[in-house]
Image: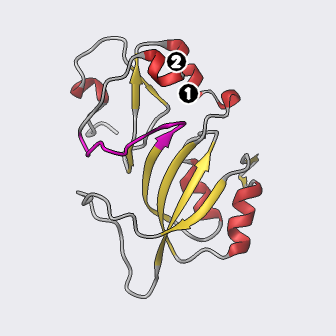
Amino acid sequence: HPKLKTLKEFIPLLNIYPVGRLDADSEGLLILTDNGKLQNELASPTKKVFKKYWVQVENIPKESDLKELETGIKIKDYLTKPAKLRFIEDPKIWHREKPIRERKKIPTSWLEIQICEGKNRQIRKMTAAINCPTLRLIRVAIGNYSIEGINPGEYMNFADHDLIT
C-alpha cells in the first residue's frame, strides 16, 4: 500500500530483516535481526516454532469449530497444520488507534491461537472459515519471546545467542 510507512522509514539501519511479518492491520511482536541463521531458526515452518496470537473475533466460535481449527482447516486448496486454541478473557491491552468494527447485535470473543506456520493472513482466513471474522489480531509471542513488559512502540535488544538458546 503506497501510503503506509515501512520499517525502513522507522529504523535507519541497513541489513535488518523481520522474523516473519505483520500485516498493516495487525499488532504485536516483531523480531528484527541482521542474522540470517537466526531469522531462519525462528521463521522457517520446518523448525516448527510456535507463534502465539490473541485474536478478537466476531461471534462466539462453537467447540466444533475450534476442533476443526485444531486439527487443520482447508483454506482454498491448502490444509493448515494443526493449531493450538483456547478461549481467553479480554486481555486488557493498549488502546487501538484505529478502532475495530463493532456491531451492537453481534457478540465478540477472544481466542489465543498458536500456529507453527505463517501463510499470508492465515489467522484471518482461519477464523473467517468458521464464520468468526477477525476484528483484532495481536502477535504476543514467537517461541519463548513475548511482548510481556514491552509497550507499543518500544523495543528490546537481544544478542543472537539469547534468542536461540
- Report if residue 95 lies within the magenta region: no
Q: Is residue 108 left or right of residue 152?
A: right
Please tell me which residue is depicted at 40% across the width and 69% down the height of the picture: 90
Q: Quadrant of residue 160?
A: top left
Position of the C terminus by quadrant:
top right
Q: Quadrant of residue 16?
A: top left
Circle 2 crowding by C-alpha within 10 Å: few under 14, some 14–19, many from 20: some
Query: What x and y, as percent, mark residue 148?
Result: 36, 45
Please tell me which residue is depicted at 77% across the width and 56% down the height of the picture: 71
Q: Please state which amino acid type lies under the numbered disc 2.
A: Leu
Q: Please state which amino acid type lies under the numbered disc 1.
A: Leu
Query: What x and y, as percent, mark residue 78?
Result: 74, 46
Range of magenta residues = 141-153
Q: Is 32 rendered above or below residue 25?
A: above
Please tell me which residue is depicted at 55% across the width and 27% down the height of the picture: 42
Q: Quadrant of residue 91?
A: bottom left
Please tell me which residue is depicted at 57% across the width and 55% down the height of the picture: 113
* Secondary structure beneath label 2: helix
Camera-side residue of 49 and 134: 49
Q: How many marks?
A: 2
Q: Which residue matches tag 1? A: 42
Q: Is 140 rendered above or below residue 112?
A: above
Q: Which residue matches tag 2? A: 38
Circles 1 and 2: CB distance less than 8 Å? yes
Q: Main secondary structure of the magenta part?
A: loop
- Report if residue 148 lies within the magenta region: yes
Q: Is 143 rendered above or below residue 163?
A: below
Position of the N terminus by quadrant:
top left
